[in-house]
Amino acid sequence: NHLNNGYIYKDRQLQPYCLIDQQFLADRYIEGECPICGYPHARGDQCDHCGNTLDPVELINPHCKICGQSEIEFRETEHFFFDLGKASSELARWLNEDKAHWRSHVINYARQQAESGELRGRAVTRDIDWGINVPVPGYEDKVIYVWYDAVIGYLSATREAVALNGEPEAWKDWWFDKSVKSYYFIGKDNIPFHAIFWPAMLIADGRGMNLPYDVPANAYLNIEDKKISTSRRWTIDLPDFLSRYDPDPLRYALTINAPETRDVNFTWEEFLRRNNDELVATWGNLVNRTLGFAYKRFDKRVPAPGEFDDLDRALLKQSEEAFERVGAEIDAVRLKIALSKAMELAHAANRYLNEKAPWAQIKTDPQAAATTIYVTLQVIDRLKVILHPFLPFTTQQLHHFMGYDGDLFGELVIEEVEDDRGVHKTLRYDGSGVQVRWEPATLTPGQPLRKPHALYKKLDPKIVEEERERLLARLGASI
């Protein structure tokens, strides 16, 4: 459709050619100094430091990433181009519609680009030996370049998914139904491709497909005050992390300190504090002492409550309202705030439990103790649902402790499928075992409980230096 609608044209362009390797270089195989901000490791398509898109010929003192040499010349070659300029007026109009829910650094950048008058044609083909061949006679030696076909993957993945479900035409529901909202979760280096190029491509298609509802791009996450670098091995590899720690503490630490609007720093000291002071001491402690007390003192069952007093009703109301409060923040992709509000409820439940002191009530008024434990279990049961998007592994364990079977919100399943490309694996969602909905439910008195154990482990402070030393050792090995 882009070709038929006049958004694809042919032109000649200078492309980098390595005299050592005797091949044209893809944009990410040439590196040099950014002409805009001076960053020394800018790539041929983009500078990760300032976020601007680039053309390889703009780089200062470029060198080949394959051989490391600077023996590069720019040769003229013919390519197909996508006409971004032709789409710019419609793109600018769309970007100036209701975008109050967009993060300011995303929408400000996108509007500035669309309204600058500087959007120009961008090559969509390359002279390289990998990629999808151009389906035009006479151009079989060229391939479609990755920036162009990568974002189309959102559309093709949708078509593949619904076809696997036996509904090959259902993709249209996702792309043409105006009630559908699409969110693109990316890093800030991908803002140009998702807030400019991809919407322009959808506009150029001409069929009225849904444009992005939101592009909640994160800023950068650094590690111990240094930029993450795979080449320098300044990274924390997930398999290595999981060999020593559980996944949910990392999910919690990364979410509560997410780089939603600015670059942030991950430190092992902060990870330790978040785990010990918040997961273990607040949420984990609430679960442990409440379930442990109920399991031991109320015959391994949810106790039947008596009449609720003002404190009981206030906490139950707060737990009901938390679904709307936290849900609204999740919908707005303000996940840090969403998680913070969920933890506020955990803090409130701890204060309630301390004030009621069921361990003292049980000695003089067992019914009052039963009511206190029931109310706290009810809040925990609701928090289990609210926290599940952030802490899926431990909330699933908690679901089991509280006497339920099955999965809270379904599960991800890896399946092997066969199509015209052969046999390959797909990641699919199985919601057949879903147990709950995003709404406050009422806990059933008398429900059997399973023996609980601690959801989180208190970490020794010595891990901070141990992990820093691991990082430095990895860095030294890469030099």
Image (spheres, rainbow, N blue to C red):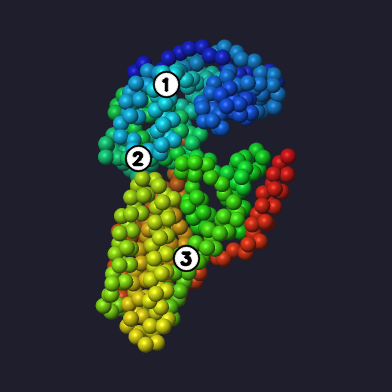
The spot of residue 41 in percent (x, y) is 62, 30
Q: CB atoms at circles 1 and 3 under 8 Å apart?
A: no
- Relative placement, left or right, of 270 versus 175 is right
The spot of residue 137 in percent (x, y) is 46, 15
For the residue labelled by badge 3, is the local secondary structure a helix, a strand or a loop? helix
Mark 1 and mark 2: Cα distance apart in space: 23 Å
Residue positioned 30% across, 67% down in the render: 314
Q: Which mark is residue 101?
A: 2
Residue closest to the eye, 417 or 234: 234
Q: Quadrant of residue 66?
A: top right
Residue positioned 61% across, 29% down in the render: 39
Query: Dot 1, how many residues are within 10 Å of its Cα: few (below 14), some (14-19), or many (20+)?
Result: few
Q: Which mark is residue 116?
A: 1
**Three-letter amino acid code at disc 2?**
His
Residue positioned 39% across, 84% down in the render: 362
Sequence order check, earlier mark of 1 and 2: 2
Q: Residue furthest bottom?
A: 364
* Residue named by callout 3: 282
**Three-letter amino acid code at disc 1?**
Ser
The C terminus is located in which quarter?
Answer: top right
